[in-house]
Image (cartoon, coloured by chain):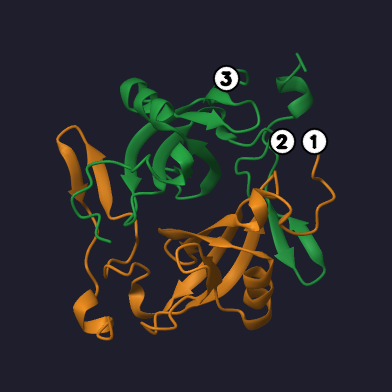
Chain colours: A green, B orange
């Protein structure tokens, strides 16, 4: 049960894919959650930029590779079970979300349905022109 | 592709289990990540207390049911893909982690291995006497 001796996230869990939370290192805002495999984690450590594993595209996802909105990693943490990763990042461009919001969590649940609470930093149509 | 019209997290994804991040509503500290199914999400909305689904025990996990360290939910958000939940909570007892730390992310990755950066709020041996 104990993971006291773990020196890193345990990629033997979660079928090799662990959730990774990106938090703005300055403001504390939670920007997004994505997944990492061993390879993306290693590349993140090596380059200092957040690299995830895209489950939909089934390949490494170098965050910002298309939009330019890379994440410079300031610190990395992992949790008591060694199966979740926390990255404190500097979000280049001010927006982590592909929909143009600073955070992917721009919708708040209310009794009347969801309410958009985030501010749009960019227009996705302008940034992802190739699509 | 679009989820603009989603009114709630989409529990048809992730085989019915979605990651849920608990963040301290006051300090912005990320406390933990757990999982929710439709039932635990509904009970969370109804009671205003965080209820997760324990993958290891395969049942609802009313956070704090043993330790008393419940989480009072102040706000709920979900992300652009509607497959991750964010709870802003008041953590009763000051510690979310079963190891006695305020946050489960008490280990930081450093070039020399991990470093414990969290403060222990309680002694797990005292709190979980039944184990």
Determine crowd level at label 2: few under 14, some 14-19, many 20+ residues with C-alpha closer than 10 A: many
Residue drawn at the location 51% of the way across and 28% of the way down: A92
What is the spatial separation of the Cα atoms under label 3 and label 2, in whole angstroms? 14 Å
Camera-nearest residue between B90 and A20: A20
First along the sequence among labels 3 and 2: 3
Q: Please identify the quarter of the rendering in which residue A108 is found.
A: bottom right
Instruction: State the residue position of label 1.
Output: B1
Foreground disc of the pair 1, 3 = 1
Determine the secondary structure under disc 1: loop
Residue B59, image x and y in percent?
54, 72
Foreground disc of the pair 2, 1 = 1
Mark 1–mark 3 CB contact (< 8 Å)? no
Q: Chain of mark 2?
A: A
On whether disc 1 and disc 3 are found on a single subunit, the reply is no
Residue lying furthest left: B112
Q: Quadrant of the C terminus of chain B?
A: bottom left
On whether disc 3 and disc 2 are found on a single subunit, the reply is yes
Q: Chain of mark 3?
A: A
Q: Is residue B14 left or right of residue B61?
A: right
What numbered label is drawn on residue A68? 3
Residue B40, image x and y in percent?
62, 71
Residue drawn at the location 76% of the way across and 21% of the way down: A126
Q: Is residue A119 left or right of residue A55?
A: right
Instruction: State the residue position of label 2.
Output: A99
Determine crowd level at label 1: few under 14, some 14-19, many 20+ residues with C-alpha closer than 10 A: few
What is the spatial separation of the Cα atoms under label 1 and label 3, in whole angstroms? 22 Å
């Amino acid at each position: 049960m104990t993971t006291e001796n773990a020196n890193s996230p345990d990629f033997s869990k979660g079928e090799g894919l662990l959730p990774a939370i990106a938090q703005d290192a300055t403001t504390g805002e939670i920007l997004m959650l994505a997944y990492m495999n061993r390879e993306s984690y290693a590349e993140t450590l090596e380059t200092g930029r957040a690299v995830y594993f895209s489950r939909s595209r089934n390949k490494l996802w170098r965050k910002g590779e298309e939009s330019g909105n890379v994440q410079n990693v300031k610190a990395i943490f992992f949790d008591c079970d060694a199966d979740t990763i926390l990255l404190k990042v500097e979000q280049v461009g001010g927006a982590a979300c592909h929909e143009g919001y600073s955070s992917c969590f721009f919708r708040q649940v209310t009794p009347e349905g969801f309410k958009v609470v985030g501010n749009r930093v960019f227009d996705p149509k302008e940034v992802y022109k190739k699509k």
